[in-house]
Image (spheres, helix red, strand yellow):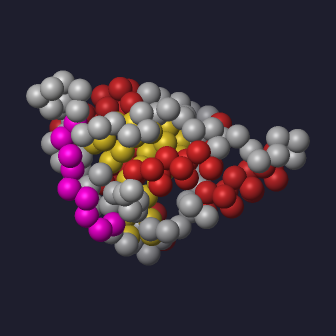
């Protein structure tokens, strides 16, 4: 499979390189689930079963509190629950993510849907949109780790207005 958008395609048993050493096995693309369990019982109960496709969820907290870990776990769980998932990481490279997810595979099973890591970090919401559209996949979950590194539309605006605009733009994806 050709690498699109300088990303890594992960799915089914695709965590090991194919025979040519460069390509990855192609996963089966299925319709996204409508509700994606987070794995956190109380949160799932509060959200009506889990994350709902087509909605924006913002996870906020102090540094080192586990926001990125939570985002990676949700992306993995979504792909394991037949939801094509795009993971934009602005902190870790695809090899770091691949290592983390190989551990997940060993302990939690293998995704049954597309799980694609975009590590050539687009720095704007429009770049994320273009990356998603260029794949031609119907994405059920898009994870952006993390919001603070996205380029605001107007850098001179107060930070709260910038975050509000970025959130609004992500919602429109």
Query: How many labels were placed on the picture?
Result: 0
In terms of image quadrants, where is residue 84?
bottom left
Q: Quadrant of the N terminus?
A: top left
- Magenta segment, principal secondary structure? loop
Q: On the rendered structure, is 159 left or right of 43?
A: right
Give the image location of residue 115, x and y in percent.
Answer: 33, 48
Give the image location of residue 53, x and y in percent.
Answer: 44, 68
The residue drawn where x is 88% and y is 41% is: 156
Q: On the rendered structure, is 3 left or right of 12?
A: right
Q: Is residue 99 above or below residue 58?
A: above
Q: Quadrant of the C terminus?
A: bottom right
Q: Nearer the viewer, residue 105 or 61?
A: 105
The residue drawn where x is 64% and y is 43% is: 124
Task: Answer whether residue 144 is magenta in the image.
Answer: no
In terms of image quadrants, where is residue 140?
bottom left
In terms of image quadrants, where is residue 63?
top right
Task: Answer whether residue 28 is magenta in the image.
Answer: yes
The residue drawn where x is 55% and y is 52% is: 129
The residue drawn where x is 53% and y is 67% is: 55
What range of the chain is rendered magenta? 24-32
């Amino acid at each position: 499979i050709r690498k699109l958008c300088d990303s890594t395609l992960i799915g089914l048993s695709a965590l090991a390189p194919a025979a040519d050493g460069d390509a990855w096995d192609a996963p089966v693309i299925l319709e996204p689930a409508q509700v994606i369990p987070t794995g956190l019982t109380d949160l799932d109960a509060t959200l009506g079963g889990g994350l709902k496709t087509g909605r924006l969820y913002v996870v906020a907290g102090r540094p080192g509190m586990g926001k990125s870990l939570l985002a990676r776990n949700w992306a993995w769980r979504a792909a394991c629950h037949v939801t094509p998932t795009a993971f934009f990481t602005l902190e870790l490279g695809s090899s770091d993510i691949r290592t983390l997810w190989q551990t997940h595979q060993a302990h939690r099973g293998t995704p049954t849907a597309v799980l694609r890591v975009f590590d050539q970090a687009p720095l704007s919401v429009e770049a994320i949109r273009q990356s998603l559209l260029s794949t031609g996949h119907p994405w059920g979950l898009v994870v952006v780790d993390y919001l603070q590194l996205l380029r605001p539309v107007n850098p001179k605006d107060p930070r709260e207005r910038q975050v509000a605009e970025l959130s609004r733009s992500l919602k429109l994806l």
